[in-house]
């Protein structure tokens, strides 16, 4: 960091991470922890006190100690802690100010990912809504590591819908673990007059985050059963998934609409209701691949090629890299997400088909929103190297642009491709791009390519 990357800042350990060197069996005691960490460039420990008690025993490290102290005091000076040692500790009475809540709502709205929509969304405000599931009126949606966020300060989905003017009938129906306490007959009777069902299900906020791995990334079984029972009501279903990780969502794919709602924090209910009623068009995209089956995990878009690849739709070739019971492809790929808009791409132009160390290539096109909804398209640029000193991924996301368009509006979009766009770290950790051909893709997500162009990189000796 300090020599090769020329990092000038302060280096601090994670919680008790330096002390854990003894658990990893690479330091026999705190004295050795202090020596090794200081020699490696650590400036400050978090929680562990090897520096406090043992640095004075290591005379040969005086230079390193002085450097660490300099870094720490410099940071404190930049933070203003010499003038106000308790700076920032009074923030708790400010974080619920209206301006901050508004920003929290905007961030939450931008995080929602629309996975399926068979025409039910956005919802007409005259519709009578049946809200079913353990997350329908649940305040515990801040997520793990939400700092000072308090559950009682969050807006629930029910509260958000009612604030938006919807007529809502709410029934929890089951606990997060799936334990039911409402009969099918009671559900039928209570929701017989509603126009649409919103099913709010998923994980508890404590089921994900640090120290919360799961061997089965499923929606708890009882909630899956609730979904199938709700289907018997013969009403349109909008399913909202609350979770902190990709889950196996295949059982819910046939919903009239499917939303990945995550844990959206303080303004969760307002953000989701604004999406549902169409005040905001969803613009979130998946930053993780959602598998179809648990057996596909680990699954990610930028995987390395195989010597026995299988083309999409090809399923019967025995000696290939494949499953015999599911496809190789995810349920929802990296970069995926729907909006309320419809977008047309046209008039693709490229400045030239070759590139060198010094020049740039410009790729441009037009996007038109052909719908009646203002919406944002996330245009993604991927590259594929046809050759490299080491094996390179099948696809690599290298750029993206948010394009907000009013109904029937068109905008020109331009990407700049240059040497570093094509480059990677080789086996010597050098940033290089090998001479040869590169495929450039304009895409909606990692598995749907709208436009493909081939560039030839020429590198002078």
Image (spheres, rainbow, N blue to C red):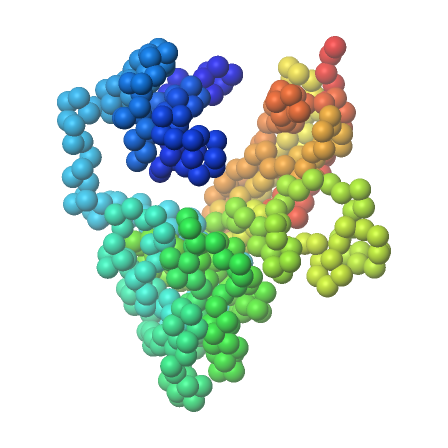
Q: Residue 52 at x, y = what percent? A: 27, 26
Observer-nearest residue: 293 or 188? Answer: 293
Quadrant position of residue 186: bottom left
Does 178 sit above or below residue 2?
Answer: below
Q: Nearer the viewer, residue 159 or 13?
A: 13
Left or right of 27 on screen, residue 393: right
Name the spot of residue 101 as percent of width and height, x first.
27, 49
Residue at horizontal 38%, vertical 31%? 29
Residue 378 horizontal side relative to residue 326, left or right: left
Return the x and y of residue 328 as percentages of the image width and height.
70, 54
What residue appears at the point 36 percent right and 74 percent down from the top-left corner?
172
Q: Residue at x 84, y 52 (%)?
A: 319
Q: In this view of the protein, can residue 370 be seen by the observer?
A: no
Tell me which residue sits at (50%, 80%) in the image: 229
Nearest the viewer among 241 and 166 is 241
Q: Nearer the viewer, residue 366 or 62?
A: 62
Residue 12: image location, x then y, percent = 36, 28
Q: Is residue 412 above or below residue 294?
A: above
Q: Quadrant of residue 198?
A: bottom left
- Direction from residue 309 to residue 188 in the image, left or right: left
Q: Is residue 210 above or below residue 236?
A: above
Residue 83 visible in the snapshot: yes
């Amino acid at each position: 960091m300090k020599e090769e990357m020329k990092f000038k800042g302060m280096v601090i350990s994670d919680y008790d991470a330096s002390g854990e060197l003894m658990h990893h069996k690479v330091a026999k005691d705190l004295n050795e922890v202090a020596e090794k960490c200081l020699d490696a460039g650590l400036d400050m420990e978090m929680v562990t006190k090897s520096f406090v008690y043992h640095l004075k025993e290591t005379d040969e490290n005086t230079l390193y100690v002085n450097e660490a102290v300099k870094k720490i005091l410099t940071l404190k000076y930049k933070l203003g802690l010499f003038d106000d040692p308790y700076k920032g500790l009074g923030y708790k009475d400010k974080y619920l100010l209206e301006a901050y809540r508004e920003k929290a709502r905007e961030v939450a709205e931008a995080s929602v990912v629309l996975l399926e929509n068979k025409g039910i969304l956005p919802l007409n405000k005259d519709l009578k809504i049946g809200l079913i599931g353990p997350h329908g009126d649940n305040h515990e949606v801040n997520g793990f590591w939400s700092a000072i966020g308090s559950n009682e300060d969050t807006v629930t989905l029910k509260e958000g819908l009612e604030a938006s003017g919807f007529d809502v009938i709410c029934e929890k129906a089951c606990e997060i673990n799936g334990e039911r306490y409402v009969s099918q007959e009671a559900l039928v009777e209570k929701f017989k007059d509603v126009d649409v069902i919103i099913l709010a299900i998923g994980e508890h906020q404590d089921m994900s985050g640090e120290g919360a791995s799961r061997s089965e990334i499923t929606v708890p079984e009882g909630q899956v059963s609730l979904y199938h029972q709700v289907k018997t009501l013969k009403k349109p279903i909008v399913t909202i998934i609350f979770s902190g990780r990709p889950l196996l969502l295949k059982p819910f794919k046939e919903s009239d609409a499917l939303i990945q709602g995550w844990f959206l924090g303080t303004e969760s209910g307002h953000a989701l209701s604004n999406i549902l009623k169409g005040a905001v068009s969803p613009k979130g995209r998946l930053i993780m691949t959602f598998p179809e089956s648990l057996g596909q995990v680990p699954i990610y878009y930028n995987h390395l090629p195989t010597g026995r690849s299988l083309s999409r739709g090809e399923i019967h070739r025995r000696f290939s890299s494949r499953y015999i019971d599911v496809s190789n492809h995810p349920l929802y790929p990296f970069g995926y997400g729907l909006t309320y808009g419809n977008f047309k791409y046209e008039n693709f132009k490229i400045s030239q088909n070759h590139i060198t160390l010094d020049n740039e290539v410009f790729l441009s096109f037009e996007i038109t929103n052909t719908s009646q909804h203002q919406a944002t398209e996330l245009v993604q640029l991927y590259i594929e190297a046809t050759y490299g000193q080491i094996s390179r991924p099948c696809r690599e996301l290298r750029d993206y642009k948010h394009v907000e368009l009013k109904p029937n509006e068109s905008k020109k979009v331009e990407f700049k491709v240059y040497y570093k766009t094509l480059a990677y770290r080789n086996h010597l950790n050098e940033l290089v791009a090998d001479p040869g051909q590169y495929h450039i893709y304009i895409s909606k997500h990692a598995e749907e390519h709208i436009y493909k162009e081939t560039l030839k990189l020429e590198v002078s000796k």
